[in-house]
Each structure stands twice: as C-alpha cells, then as structure tokens.
Amino acid sequence: MIINAEKIGTAIVAHIQGELDMANADQLRASIDEKLDQYETIRDVYLICDAVPFIDSSGLAVLLGRYRKLEERGGKLFIANPSPQARRVMELSGLSKLVGICDNWNPADLQQRGVTNG
C-alpha cells in the first residue's frame, strides 16, 4: 500500500493506492493517527480511494476507528472517489451511512468547504 498524506488547512488529504486489508490496515491507521496527533487543528480527513481495489474487515475497522476519532474532534471522515469495489464494501457494511462519500472529488473542493492553507 502507498499512502501520500498532506495537511491542507484543517484537513488531511490522503491518496491511497493498494488493498486495504489485514496486511496493511495498520499502515493506514498509523499514517492518519500520526497526522492527527501532530496537528490538533485537523478536523476532517479525506481518503482518496480510487486506487483501492479491495477492503476487508481489518480495513473497515481502521476506517471506523478514524471516523470515531474524528467525530470526537468535531470532524468527519470522507471517502473520496471510491473504486466500485470499495464503495460496495462500504455500502454492504453500513459504513457509507456514517462517512461522507464524495464522487468526482478533487482537493480544490476543500476551498468550497472553507478549508484553506494557513
């Protein structure tokens, strides 16, 4: 799995490539939690999942855990541009009812939500 995460204003935007499964779910958890611990001002996390072909229960657990952590901070987890397979798993599990699903999303959309650098 490849994770490229950056802070943009009060958000983290992370591009994820590869399967989100038991073999690498902890890598995503550690990457996001490190940014959340580093920046107390972070409220929202956007996971760009167009290159995530598979999510298993371990991956779902990481997503649910980040959802809860962000909710405690008054923020939200967004899944951006999910692959059809990732979307299906989130719909079947009910996770799509908790997190924001953003289709055709790009980082410029953060400005529309009032998230800016600085």
Image (cartoon, helix red, strand yellow):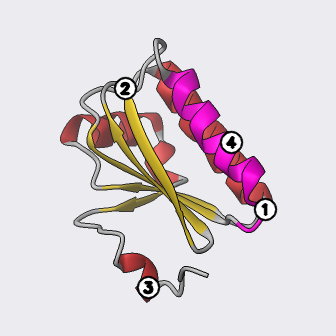
- Residue at screen point 50% across, 31% down: 60
Mark-to-mark CA distance, 2 and 4: 17 Å
- Residue at screen point 36% across, 78% down: 109
| Secondary structure, magenta segment, majority class | helix
- Residue type at mark 4: give it: Glu
Instruction: Give x and y (percent) for residue 90.
Output: 40, 40
Indicate the quadrant where residue 4 lies.
top left
Q: Disc number at residue 40?
A: 1
> Looking at the image, is mark 2 or mark 4 earlier in the sequence?
2
Secondary structure, mark 1, is: loop
Mark-to-mark CA distance, 1 and 4: 11 Å
The one of 88 and 109 positioned closer to us in this rendering: 109
**Residue stretch in magenta:** 25-41
Asked if the magenta segment contains residue 12, the reply would be no
- Residue at screen point 58% across, 37% down: 31
- Residue at screen point 26% across, 63% down: 103
> Looking at the image, is mark 1 or mark 2 earlier in the sequence?
2
Which quarter of the image is occupied by the C terminus? bottom right
Mark-to-mark CA distance, 3 and 4: 24 Å
- Left or right, residue 70 beside residue 93: right
**Residue 26 vertical placement versus 108 (above, below):** above
Q: Callout 3 environment at 10 Å: few (<14), some (14 to 19), or many (20+)?
A: few
Secondary structure, mark 2, is: loop
Q: Are marks 3 and 4 in contact (CB under 8 Å)?
A: no
Secondary structure, mark 4, is: helix
- Residue type at mark 3: give it: Gln
